[in-house]
Structures are given as C-alpha cells and as structure tokens.
Amino acid sequence: MFQVEPGGLLEGERLTIFRWIYDQVPQGYYVCPAVRLQDAFFRPKDTGLARFVLASSPLATTILDAVIVSLETGRIVAVVQQVGDERMGLIERTADDAGVPVIEGRPGNHIPWEKIIG
C-alpha cells in the first residue's frame, strides 16, 4: 500500500539516501522522502501572526531527506539526513525534543533498527 518507489522529484544525494534507506526499512514501516521539518514535528493550530512566524522560520524551509513512519501508529520513528547538512543542529534539536533519533545519511552504513524501533 505505501510502497513508494523513488521518483523524478528526488535527485543526487537525496535520491541515493532514499534508495539506501528504502532498501533497509523493516516491514511495517515506510519512508517518506523530502519532508519539511515543520510538517514532520509541528501541527500549528494557531492562526494569524503565530502561523506567519512559524511559516517564515527556518522550520518551514528546512527539508528532511526522509522520515521513517510506523504503519501501525502513523508516528515518525526516525529522521534521515545527509551528513554535513548546514541545518543539522536545528534538525537534531527538534528531533531530540520529539524523542526521535536522527540517522546520518551515509549510504552503505548499517542502520541499527533494533535500537531505533525496539
């Protein structure tokens, strides 16, 4: 149902990272490529000025290479990001606040799924 193959919207390093993570993701989980940090971790209910401030912040312009989502719960269980991304600090702080690990996007490396999903 959620078996999404890499498409034309991904290219270069992001496509390589997506294919690497897609090939390893355990059954019962799926990979969502190119997700805004804001969309992954914030559900703004505010309107007006508060919504404008959030939309114009780095949260709205930071793109995560991929998020891993549980099919059972719909929750994000991990974030995947290129090594050396200029906004890695923001990504790590936000993910840490949400209790979600960040996987460094180094294709070829083993991903410790047993630690990530238990």
Image: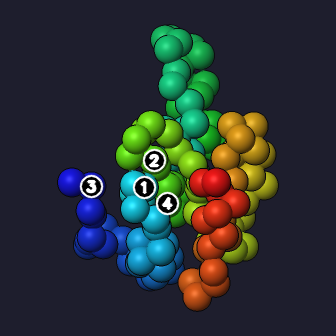
Give the side of residue 64 with respect to residue 116, left or right.
Answer: left
Residue 7 lies in quadrant = bottom left
Mark toward the viewer: 4 or 3: 3
What residue do we see at 69% from left, 37% from top?
98
Residue kind at label 4, given as amino acid type = Ala
2 and 1 marks in contact (CB < 8 Å): yes
Mark 3 residue element: loop
User: Which tag, 4 or 1, sits closer to the chain's start?
Assistant: 1
* Vertical placement of residue 26 versus 110, above or below: above
Q: Is residue 6 left or right of residue 104?
A: left
Identify the mark nearer the N-term, 4 or 3: 3
Crowding at mark 3 (Cα within 10 Å: few <14, some 14-19, many 20+): few
Q: In front: 69, or 46?
A: 69
Residue 78 at what x, y percent from top left? 59, 54
Q: Position of residue 63 (x, y in %)?
A: 53, 55
Which residue is labeled 4 in the image? 66
Looking at the rendered structure, which numbered label has been put on residue 2? 3
Which label lies toward us, 4 or 1? 1
Q: Determine whether 45 is above or below 16 in the image.
A: above
Contact (CB < 8 A) between labels 3 and 2?
no
Amino acid type for the residue under numbered disc 2: Ser
